[in-house]
Amino acid sequence: MVDQTLSCTFAGSLQSITPRLRDFIARHEPDELLVALPIHDHALRRHALELTAAMQATLSSGLHVSP
């Protein structure tokens, strides 16, 4: 079960996550994605959301990311 969960978990830089997420979307064709940011510090959480938005802008699949 842990292996299945980790196969759907993406952590790292934009450069490392974007191609893996693009492959995941192509393979599974999800209708939506859930972004969980268990970050207590407001500034760091905001930065993570900004990075998520930047990554979403680079994906060509029409994926919509909402906080």
Image: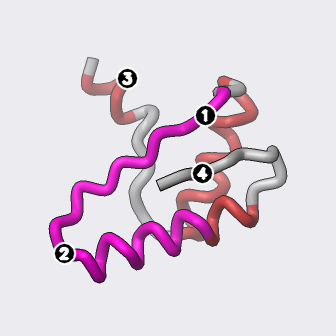
As drawn, 52 above or below 19: below
Give the x, y percent position of residue 33.
54, 38
Residue at 71% across, 26% down? 29
Residue 65's label in the rendered image is 4
> What are the residue bounds of the magenta stretch?
31-53
The alpha-carbon separation of the residues under discs 2 and 3 comes to: 29 Å
Of label 2 and label 3, which has the lower sequence position? 3
Task: Answer with left or right where residue 13 lies relative to residue 43.
Answer: right
Q: Nearer the viewer, residue 11 or 38?
A: 38
Identity, as a three-letter code, of the amino acid under mark 3:
Gln
- Sequence-wise, the earlier of marks 1 and 4 is 1
Report, in whole angstroms, how far the alpha carbon at label 4 lies from the one at label 2.
Answer: 21 Å
Q: CA distance from mark 1 to mark 2?
A: 26 Å
Quadrant assignment, res 2: top left
Q: Which residue is mark 1?
A: 32
Residue type at mark 2 is Asp
Which of label 3 and label 4 is nearer to you? 4
Which SS class for mark 1? Answer: loop
- Label 4 crowd (10 A; few <14 / some 14-19 / many >=20): some
Relative height, residue 56 to residue 45 (above, below): above
Give the residue furthest to the left: 40
| Callout 3 crowding tier (Cα within 10 Å): few <14, some 14–19, many ≥20 | few
Residue drawn at x 46%, y 40% as measured from the top left: 34
Q: Earlier in the sequence, mark 3 or mark 1?
A: 3
Q: Is residue 23 left or right of residue 9?
A: right
Residue placed furthest toward the top: 1
Q: Which mark is residue 41?
A: 2
Q: Is residue 31 above or below residue 40?
A: above
Amino acid at circle 1: Glu
